[in-house]
């Protein structure tokens, strides 16, 4: 369970309670402060906006998901491990579904929350034992964000306690995403091999050109330049 008894937690709790009662767009910071039994000054010391409150809530959810995530078993497919992590996230969010539905229906999210969503995806990948670093990790993060966003909308309307629709949609999209990511990774590896081959060829040509430019001119045994008249040892004009 999320600990909403902290100083920040009481504002998050108040915001979610108000969102569950009416459209999130109509909720003001002053109302959140009042519901939390505090003042706007107290709220301002913790958050700069409603988007900040939501980002803090998402970060708390991330922590809870990571705490619940089981260690990936040896031989377990990445898709199966990720399925468990994402479903665990929906379990954590379930008590606040009415509030989340109100927030989602309020319109486009604040641009600052895009980074928050991507961060959540990276942590879910790591919780499933899947790397999120480098170019391949960035592609996986973007892919999971797309999958999660699509399934998230289904979860919002899935009132079945067993979340059958949500699980079916998640499994289907993860399988599709797995095939897409495999193709993308194969293409990326092929491009990397081609780039390495081209770089190696360019280095070989450069080394040969450098060698031809720096070869010393041959001199004869007397040290004179090739083609110069042989030295007689007599000073000129003698």
Image (cartoon, rainbow, N blue to C red):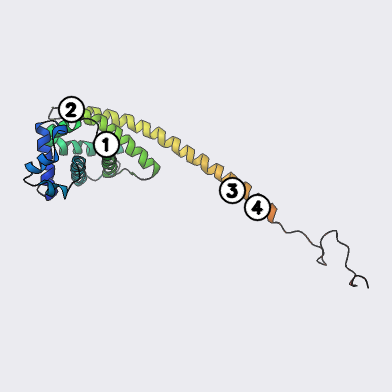
Q: Quadrant of residue 99?
A: top left
5 up-or-down from 139: above or below = below
At 76% from the left and 58% from the top, the residue drawn is 217
Judge by depth and name the residue closer to the eye, 183 or 8: 8
Sequence order check, earlier mark of 2 and 4: 2
Screen quadrant of the N terminus? top left
Q: Quadrant of residue 181?
A: top left
Judge by depth and name the residue closer to the eye, 131 or 10: 10
User: In the displayed structure, does residue 5 sit left or right of residue 136?
Assistant: left
Sequence order check, earlier mark of 4 and 3: 3
Sequence order check, earlier mark of 1 and 4: 1
C-alpha separation, residue under disc 4 versus residue under disc 3:
10 Å
Q: Furthest residue to the right?
A: 238
- Pointer 4 residue: 210
User: Could you tell me residue 169's position as x and y percent?
Assistant: 24, 27
User: In the displayed structure, does residue 21 sit left or right of residue 75?
Assistant: left
- Pointer 3 residue: 203
Q: Quadrant of residue 233?
A: bottom right
Q: Secondary structure at mark 4?
A: helix
C-alpha separation, residue under disc 1 versus residue under disc 3:
44 Å
Q: Secondary structure at mark 2?
A: helix
For marks 2 and 3, give the one nearer the viewer.
3
- Pointer 2 residue: 164
């Amino acid at each position: 369970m999320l600990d909403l008894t902290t100083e920040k937690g009481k504002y998050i709790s108040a915001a979610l309670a108000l969102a569950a009662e009416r459209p999130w767009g109509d909720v003001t910071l002053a109302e959140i402060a009042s519901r939390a039994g505090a003042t706007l000054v107290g709220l301002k010391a913790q958050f700069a906006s409603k988007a900040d409150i939501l980002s803090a809530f998402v970060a708390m959810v991330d922590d809870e998901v990571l705490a619940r995530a089981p260690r990936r078993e040896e031989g377990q497919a990445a898709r199966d491990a990720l399925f468990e992590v994402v479903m665990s996230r929906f379990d954590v969010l379930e008590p606040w579904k009415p509030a989340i539905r109100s927030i989602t229906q309020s319109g486009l999210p604040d641009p600052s929350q895009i980074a928050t969503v991507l961060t959540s995806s990276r942590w879910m990948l790591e919780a499933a034992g899947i790397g999120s670093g480098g170019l391949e990790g960035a592609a996986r993060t973007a892919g999971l964000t797309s999958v999660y966003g699509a399934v998230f909308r289904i979860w919002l309307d899935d009132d079945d306690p067993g979340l059958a629709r949500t699980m079916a949609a998640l499994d289907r999209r993860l399988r599709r995403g797995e095939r897409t990511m495999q193709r993308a990774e194969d293409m990326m590896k092929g491009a990397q091999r081609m780039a390495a081959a081209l770089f190696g060829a360019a280095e070989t040509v450069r080394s040969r050109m450098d060698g031809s430019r720096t070869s010393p001119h041959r001199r004869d045994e007397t040290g004179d330049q090739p083609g110069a008249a042989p030295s007689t040892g007599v000073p000129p004009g003698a």
